[in-house]
Image (cartoon, rainbow, N blue to C red):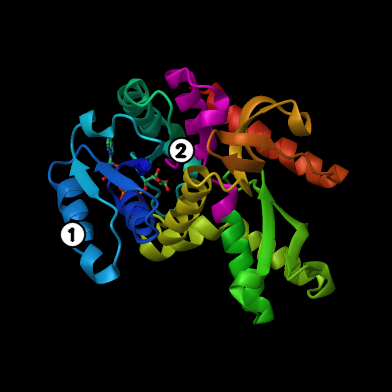
Amino acid sequence: MLKRPKITVVGAGNVGATVAQYAALKELGDIVLTDIVEGVPQGKALDMQESAPVEGFDSLIIGTNSYEETAESDVIVITAGIARKPGMSRDDLVDTNVKVIRQVVKEVAPRSPDACFVLVTNPSDVMAQVAFRESGFAPERIIGLGGVLDSARFRTFIAQELKVSFEDVSAFVLGGHGDDMVPLARYSYVSGIPIDKLLDQATIDRLVQRARQGGAEIVNYLKTGSAYYAPGASIVAMVESIVKDKRRILPCSAYVTGQYGVNDLFLGVPVMLGKNGVEKIIEIELTDAERDALHKSADGVRHVLGKL
Ligand code: APR
């Protein structure tokens, strides 16, 4: 009999609950939602499960405060920790979130030795490194959220500017998931047409800047927390590529060992995501300016890591 993939989501807050919901709607597998706050994962999981007859999905969704139910997961999405408030950078979260990640990884890693981790808690490149150190897992099994979300924002702004279908726009964002991210306009297209054939440079620069600040733009509206719909959708695209072994090429934070001239660091690069996690890191040609921007972004991630 076919065994369904098991997806654990740690942290039943805004991002975690949205991931569980999108994953259930896509029937990616059975879902365990866990959190330290009593009742919240149970309540949200049951509420979501009760949408199954209406939506027509058969994923089972379990809410719990323990880690026992997470055993033998195929993918573990870690969203536990605190989110940004207006005026905060992702790096301002590091002291609190690093403790949470260490504690969570200690619990989940031994129970699911074959899982892939998707690190969402910010700053996600740093948290991926922490999870890598704490878990002892092969680096291919640790992936941080970054480029899928950043490029989704960039794609949205390009589509809105050109008044074209969102789905026809593809874009690439490399580097750390922070203010120094590197949106690559040169590798961004509308149905195969390079965007610089459709938009002037000043407009592209404005959209790049808005993509860089995309997370902060939402935080400034929400005031009490940060984005979760686009993050949730982006995470689920990554989870889907892993559990279905789709081998999509997605920009994610992966452990680089010399690629792009960067060593031993989790950084946003194009990766092939499949059943083993990062199946391959793709190296594309960069201009000197793009490479410098990527290195500046890598230095930023390294700087935060150095403070731990
Ligand atoms: N173990 C399990 N859950 C925890 C722990 C822990 N040690 N510490 C905190 N949590 C839970 C909280 O109880 C809360 O339900 O993590 C959840 C976080 O949810 P939100 O506060 O709603 O934050 P969210 O918007 O989901 O963002 C979570 O993802 O995008 C990043 O920057 C964001 O770091 C943040 C994370």
Asked which quadrant contains residue 110, the reply is top left
At 43% from the left and 31% from the top, the residue drawn is 115
Residue 23 falls left or right of residue 240? left
In terms of depth relative to the viewer, which is nearer, 20 or 202?
20
Of tags 1 and 2, the one toward the viewer is 1
The residue pinned by badge 1 equals 47
127 above or below 198?
above
88 relative to 154 in the view: left or right: left
Residue 64: mark in rendering:
none
Segment colored magenta: 120-149
Q: Is residue 131 magenta?
A: yes
The front one of 68 and 153 is 68
Q: Picture coordinates of residue 259 (x, y %)?
A: 75, 31
Ligand 1 has an atom within 8 Å of the beta carbon of the residue at disc 2: no
| Secondary structure of the residue carrying numbered label 2 | strand
Q: Residue beneath label 2, please?
A: 119
Residue, x 47% and y 50% (percent of image)? 235
Task: Name the kind of residue labelled 2 in the image.
Answer: Leu
